[in-house]
Amino acid sequence: MKNEKGFTLLEMLLVMLVISVLLLLIIPNVVKQRSSVQGKGCDAFVKSVEAQVQAYQLEYNKVPTVDELYNGKYITSKTCPKGESITIDATDGEVTVAGKS
């Protein structure tokens, strides 16, 4: 037989086994971290909306609603990355996420 260079079937199967084991170890951690990242993204979004509420108050001298901020292009979304809606307290301009205190 000629001295052919290449991988044997056994070597390819071994590589596939190693890749499969690595994926089995990595995928659950990625899925677990996804919800954590989205929660932090919502917190950051709330801080951003609070800053826009202050900017709106300086310009119009009143506390805005979410619709006024959205229509005035102060914010680009009415919801957090997870899809939770935000509310603005009409008295002091405090921004909260629906369902959270």
Image (cartoon, rainbow, N blue to C red):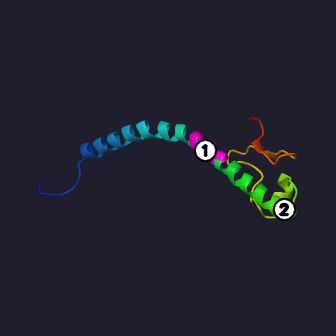
Magenta-highlighted residues: 35-43
Separation of marks 1 and 2 at Cα, in angstroms: 25 Å
Side of 25 where 77 appears, left or right: right
Q: Quadrant of residue 25?
A: top left
- Quadrant placement of the N terminus: bottom left
| In magenta segment, residue 68 | no
Q: Which residue is at a point 78% across and 52% down the rendered structure image?
A: 78
Query: Which is more toward the observer, 60 or 47?
Result: 60
Percent position (x, y) of residue 12? 29, 46
Question: Which residue position is annotated with label 2?
Answer: 71
| In magenta segment, residue 39 | yes
Q: Which mark is residue 30?
A: none
Query: Which is more toward the observer, 84 or 94?
Result: 94
Q: Which mark is residue 40?
A: 1
Q: Which residue is at a point 68% across and 50% down the rendered structure image?
A: 47
The amino acid beneath tag 2 is: Asn
Ranked by sequence position, the earlier of labels 1 and 2 is 1
- Residue 75 vertical position relative to residue 43 in the rendered view, above or below: below
Q: Secondary structure at mark 1?
A: helix
Percent position (x, y) of residue 64? 85, 55
Q: Secondary structure at mark 2?
A: helix
The amino acid beneath tag 1 is: Lys
